[in-house]
Image (cartoon, rainbow, N blue to C red):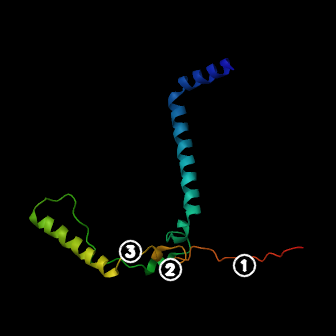
Amino acid sequence: MVTKFHRVREFVVAHQFACFIILCVVIALVMTLISLELYRRSGAIKLDMSRPGYEAVRTEVEKSSDDQPYDSSGPLNDSAINDFENRIKKYQSELDELGTYDNSIISDDSLNLTEPAESSTTEVVQ
């Protein structure tokens, strides 16, 4: 047992870079498989518009014409701060119009993420 461990250790030490690359690829594959499984089990896959078959729906999605990107590398002066505050106020007023947040809006039933309940009848055998 000690000799096998010693041989493996010598091999790893002799080929450190190759072992490092192999280990990185294995870790990346395992993490990818875990994330895909979580994606599938969580139901988020049902909401994904990038899947094949949703091309027609994607073309119907419109970008807002008033969404201008905010320059994050420009000078920090009064006009930049006022511009930022005006944008925030605009979005804040739009959110205020929606009303208060209610958890039932994003429930599984309202998003049609639940599967229909199967009516199971059990007979009592005497």
Q: Nearer the viewer, residue 98 or 83?
A: 98
Mark 2–mark 3 Cα distance, whole angstroms, equals: 31 Å
Give the x, y percent position of residue 46.
Answer: 55, 70
Q: Quadrant of residue 102?
A: bottom left
118 on left or right of 38: right
Of the two numbered discs 2 and 1 in the rendering, the one whose residue sits closer to the viewer: 1
Q: Which of the image's four quarters has the N terminus?
A: top right
Image depth: mark 2 or mark 3 in front: 3
Look at the picture and state if 83 lies above or below 65. above
Q: Which residue is mark 1?
A: 119
Q: Sequence order check: which comes first, mark 1 or mark 3?
A: 3
The residue type indicated by label 1 comes to Ser
- Asked which secondary structure carries label 1, the reply is loop
Question: Could you tell me which residue is drawn at 54 percent across and 27 percent down?
Answer: 15
Q: Is residue 15 above or below residue 60?
A: above
Residue type marked 2: Ala
Measured in 3D between alpha carbons, the distance from the residue under mark 2 to the one under mark 1, in whole angstroms, is: 35 Å
- Secondary structure state at the residue bearing disc 2: helix
Task: Tell which circle, 2 or 1, labels the residue nearer the N-terminal end.
Answer: 2
Horizontal placement of 124 versus 82: left or right? right
User: For the point 51% across and 71% down, which residue is it?
Assistant: 47
What is the x, y in percent for residue 26? 56, 42
Report the residue marked by disc 3. Answer: 101
Q: Is residue 41 above or below residue 92?
A: above
Give the distance between the C-alpha atoms of the residues marked 1 and 3, in whole angstroms.
33 Å
- The answer to whether the residues at label 2 and label 3 have Cβ atoms under 8 Å apart is no
Disc 1 to disc 3: CB gap under 8 Å: no
Q: Amino acid at mark 3?
A: Tyr
Q: Position of residue 31 (x, y in %)?
A: 54, 48
Residue under label 2: 56
Residue at point 16% right, 59% down?
74
Q: Quadrant of the C terminus?
A: bottom right
